[in-house]
Amino acid sequence: MAANYLSLTLDLPEASAELAQAVLHEAGALGLEVRDSSGASMPGVRGPTAGEAIVVAWFDRRETADSAAAEVAEQFPEARAALEAVPAKDWSEEWKALIRSVEVGRLWVGPPWEAAKAPAGKVRVVIEPKMAFGTGDHPTTSLCLAAVDEALSARPGASVLDVGTGTGVLAIAARKLGASRVVGVDNDEMSVTLAIENAAANQTEGVELSGLPVEKVSGAFDLVLANILANTLVALARPIAARVAGRLVLSGVLVGQRAEVEAAYVAEGLTPAGHRVQGEWVRLDFERK
Ligand SMILES: C[S@@+](CC[C@H](N)C(=O)[O-])C[C@H]1O[C@@H](n2cnc3c(N)ncnc32)[C@H](O)[C@@H]1O
């Protein structure tokens, strides 16, 4: 279906581009494009100046685009921003080309139109890419998928809490790999709705998906996952740490933010248990001893 969209184009230092993408996603961007030094720009498309990147975010509502522009102006005062209406185009088809399936450990995660190509023997998690984060192919998600696979190999039947579940991808993967109680929460209503749809489409019964704040989730879990931005992880350190009976896996953290996030969870009584880097992102593991 063709529709009218708005684009918010940011020219900013390349080092800020990853965080800007995450902020724009949280602010409700429907899709993102990045032009940086790692790839040649398409002919006819403006490229970044040296040391900078261009991040383009698309929105379908003027209010969301305006509030995202205000958010980036505050967080990235050095960025040059331009908000424009873009001509009608069938974006749902355009985006299909950008979503890639991933294989992580025993898991295959991808969109419905790729599912037939999933290798036999893989545990298949099919995620419809709509307006929630978590199609599997972002480094922060695949780092968590690896943790889910490892934890449930070591301890089949573990209980799992996924804080900031987005599409539900991690919760659904955990259930498919044999987790017992699985709870996924998100403070974004749209994400909860989509996570419930995805859980049903994957025939994962009994996954508890809701908008419950993490403080209100009952019990403690063998594995707690939280792929959220670093500032939120720090703010939620106390209630997240309180839900950890065994292992905690934090993602959504840029390499340079590691020490601050680690300190916040050590202060809550957890012991660091290793980390894994993918690109500019780091996953931090902790244990309750
Ligand atoms: C980066 S996405 C992760 C989605 C999915 N778990 C994954 O790994 O791909 C972060 C999610 O956290 C949610 N979120 C942000 N702040 C939150 C909070 N304070 N409590 C619960 N969820 C939150 C966002 O709505 C978003 O869906």
Image (cartoon, helix red, strand yellow):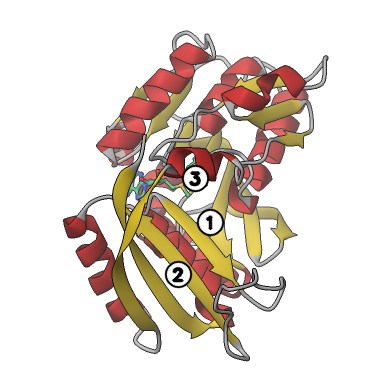
* Amino acid at the residue labelled 3: Ala
Name the residue tied to disc 3: 226
Residue count near mark 1 (Cα–Cα under 10 Å), binned few <14, some 14–19, many ≥20: many
Kind of element beneath mark 1: strand
Mark 2 or mark 3: which comes first in sequence?
Answer: 2
Q: Is residue 181 left or right of residue 78?
A: right
Residue 7 lies in what quarter of the image?
bottom left
Q: Up-down: is 188 above or below 210?
A: below
* Amino acid at the residue labelled 1: Gly
Q: Position of residue 157 (x, y in %)?
A: 64, 15
Judge depth for marks 2 and 3 and give the one in front.
Answer: 2
Residue 253 lies in what quarter of the image?
bottom right
Kind of element beneath mark 3: strand
Q: Up-down: is 130 above or below 27?
A: above
Q: In what quadrant of the picture does the C terminus appear?
A: top right
Tell whether circle 1 marks a residue whose Cβ is less than 8 angstroms from ligand 1.
yes
- Residue at 52 percent of width and 45 percent of height: 94
Q: Position of residue 273 (x, y in %)?
A: 70, 52
* Proximity of marks 1 and 3: CB atoms separated by less than 8 Å: yes
Name the residue tied to disc 1: 252
Q: Is residue 130 left or right of residue 259?
A: left
Q: Position of residue 33 (x, y in %)?
A: 52, 61
Name the residue tied to disc 2: 20
Q: In what quadrant of the picture does the N terminus appear?
A: top left
Q: Which mark is residue 274?
A: none
Q: Is residue 1 left or right of residue 116?
A: left
Tell whether circle 3 marks a residue whose Cβ is less than 8 angstroms from ligand 1.
yes
Judge depth for marks 1 and 2 and give the one in front.
Answer: 2
